[in-house]
Image (cartoon, rainbow, N blue to C red):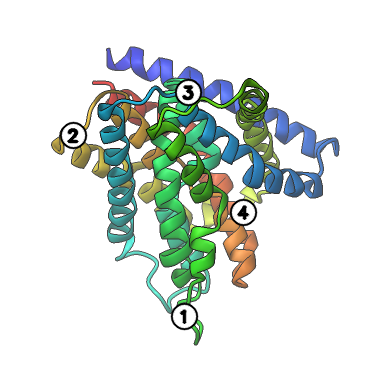
Amino acid sequence: MFIDNMLTAGTQVIILYIIVFLGFIAERLGVYAEKTAKATTNFLFYFITPAVIVNAFLSTQFSVEKAKSYGIAFLCGVATHVGAILISAPFFRKGKHPDNAVYKYASIYANMGYMALPLAEAVIGPEGVFYCSAGVITFNIFSFTHGVWLMESDSEEKKFNIKSLILNPGVLSVMVGLPLFLFSVRLPLIVAKPITYMASMNTPLAMVILGTYISKADFKTVFKDGRLFGVLALKLVLVPLTMFAVFKLAGVSGALLTAVLISASAPSASNTVMFAAKYDKNTRTASKVVSFVTFLSILTMPVIIALSKL
């Protein structure tokens, strides 16, 4: 059963990575340049991802059990981030390396929007996106508070923007979608259909963009940087296995368990690069870490997903 589940999950991951490879080739051929990828990333962030989340709420029939499960998914998201922060605490300590903040951020924060959501949709369907959207909320809460503090921790000013915490696409789309789900609102076809069409663009666009990031990474220096393997071990192995044990002991099961573990086992967030640029950190290091961990997640995520189905 474990092998069957791993093969099923692995097949879905490979399907996604075929699209990633197309993005890789397109960038190398100059068909889909870096400038275009950045513009598409903004479009994905501000329009497509919110459509995916709202569509997940619209596609889920309200029940008290579903509402309760969503609350559990939110708590699992909080637990995942708190757990990742605690597990990574002894590593990449301040003052020993100029890129410590980048390595630590990459160890804690997962690509929940652009990797977990498409994979959950592929493996579980709309129900998986529904649960994973709770992880997107917790990601935004932690990344715009602890994440900002982490990136600014070696500067004199330590602050975070409360406006960015609330007014971001992940949180706003849940604020729109959650009432629609709770009150079983059915939007007119002329509104619902465009949302569905927009949501269907998420997986291919996110994977193509990911391919362009990987194509720009300098893999020649990977094996000379031991910290990279530290991030890899923390993000893809230690954190997801720890959360698997915690969630199992807490009695989480079924599609909910698979969804929250997909979020927990996702590779380092692409936000690592954006935050590095915003807070004057080494963007080359950030790109290399994200690309390297993302590339190797093809081996680890199917195993974690298979474990969730035992």
Q: Is residue 40 above or below residue 126?
A: below
Q: CA distance from mark 4 to mark 3?
A: 35 Å
Residue 111 in view, yes or no:
no
Q: Secondary structure at mark 1?
A: loop
| Residue of label 2 | 248
For residue 287, which numbered disc appears in the image?
4
What type is the residue that disc 3 sits on?
Ser
Q: Residues within 10 Å of mark 1 (few under 14, many from 20)?
A: few
Q: Which quadrant is the N terminus positioned in?
A: top left
Tell me the residue at 50%/20% (across/down). 12
Instruction: Tell me which numbered mark, 4 or 2, is placed earlier along the sequence.
Output: 2
Name the residue located 68 percent from the left edge and 39 percent from the top edge.
209
Tag 1 residue: 158
Residue shown at 85% from the left, 35% from the top: 31
Please name the amino acid that badge 4 sits on. Answer: Ser
Left or right, residue 251 beside residue 306: left
Q: CA distance from mark 4 to mark 2?
A: 34 Å
The C terminus - image quarter: top left
Of pointers 1 and 4, the one earlier in the residue sequence: 1
Q: Is residue 232 visible?
A: yes
Residue tagged 3 = 59
- Mark 3 or mark 1, earlier in chain: 3
Q: Secondary structure at mark 2?
A: helix
Relative image position of residue 74 (x, y in whole percent): 33, 44
- Return the residue found at the far right: 30
Q: Quadrant of residue 191?
A: top right
Is the C-beta separation of discs 4 and 2 under 8 Å?
no
The alpha-carbon separation of the residues under discs 3 and 1 comes to: 41 Å
Q: Residues within 10 Å of mark 4 (few under 14, many from 20)?
A: many
Which of these two is toward me, 246 or 252? 252
What crowding class fits label 3: few (fewer than 14 Cα within 10 Å), some (14-19), or many (20 or more)? Answer: some
